Image (cartoon, grey):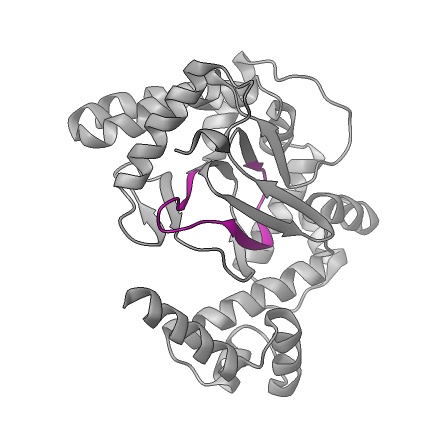
Amino acid sequence: MNPKTLPVDVPSRLQQDCEELTAIVERYTPTVGVHATAWEPLSFFRADSAGAPTCAMYEPGLGLALQGAKQIHLGQETFVHQPASYLVTSVDVPVSSQVLRATPEQPCLCLTFRFDLRHIRELLPEVKPVRAAVGSFCGLALSPLDGHLLDPLLRLARLLDAPQDLRMLGPLIERELMYRLLTGEQGARLAQIATSGSQGHQVSRAIQWLRECYDRPLRIDELAAQVNMSASSLHHHFRSMTAMSPLQYQKQLRLQEARRLLIAERCDVATAAHRVGYESPSQFSREYSRHFGAPPLRDVSRLRLTEAESVA
């Protein structure tokens, strides 16, 4: 890791641990893209150059930038994720992300740890998260990285080379990691999402329904009743957490799934539009163009060309 990627006041132990974790991630990412690991919630990312913004769905989890930098847009909010900070995603949010700083010699390297909210709920009776103001939280937040959080992540990454140890010790380290998150700066955010009956938990249930039923007609009153909220309350808290309305959220889900169908399953435009819930292919094409910056066929051709070039 380039020493300039971390502020000069970062403690030397934290610097050393970041360098070791960076080396592990780089070793497990020989090519650009996302790489799964032997521990299912843990994945690594590599980019060798800065790129154009891409649309993605961020699931609840922890993100750690180790080298380079990424810019993430959620609604009108912009987050610059770079070393010495960690990113917490508390609910599923559609974002636009862009690698800002990366070269083949100094690639952008990131680590993602996906949350299992059941594990957070199990810890809540024993842990008192840091108190925060009552109200809705944005679904993304950045905080300064400290050694308490980095240490379990590093030990988990070390165990990727020892499958037997990983199987036995992985669950214990994961529990420690959840404890560190809950007692850290973003603890209240995670507690609200995991606590049954809280507004955050109700909104997360609404998001789950939208993700599972994105192709169905959306009736706000019915969705609000299903999660035990009024329509106005759901709309307000949903927008606070995701930076968009439920209808806008559903539209982004539909367009991202349609893009996947066009690329992975090579559907024609009309079939993809119908499968994600659009009755009018022309309306679908207009909304697709506004969201991705190009009509469906041109966008898909560009993505396939980019993919072929990266493989070559």
> Which quadrant of the figure contains the N terminus?
top left
Visible in this render: residue 33?
Answer: yes
Question: Principal SS element in the magenta part?
Answer: strand
Visible in this render: residue 215?
Answer: no
Tell me which corner region of the image, top left, top right, bottom left or bottom right, holds residue 41: top left
Tell me which corner region of the image, top left, top right, bottom left or bottom right, holds residue 279: bottom right
The number of callouts visible is 0
State the residue in front, 141 or 51.
Answer: 51
State the residue in front, 181 or 33.
Answer: 33
Q: Quick check: 122 left or right of 173?
A: right
Q: Quick check: 310 left or right of 223?
A: left
Residue 89 vs 246, above or below: the answer is above
Q: Which residues are magenta?
A: 88-112
Q: Residue at x 26, y 40 (%)?
A: 27
Q: Is residue 103 magenta?
A: yes
Residue 183, image x and y in percent? 57, 17
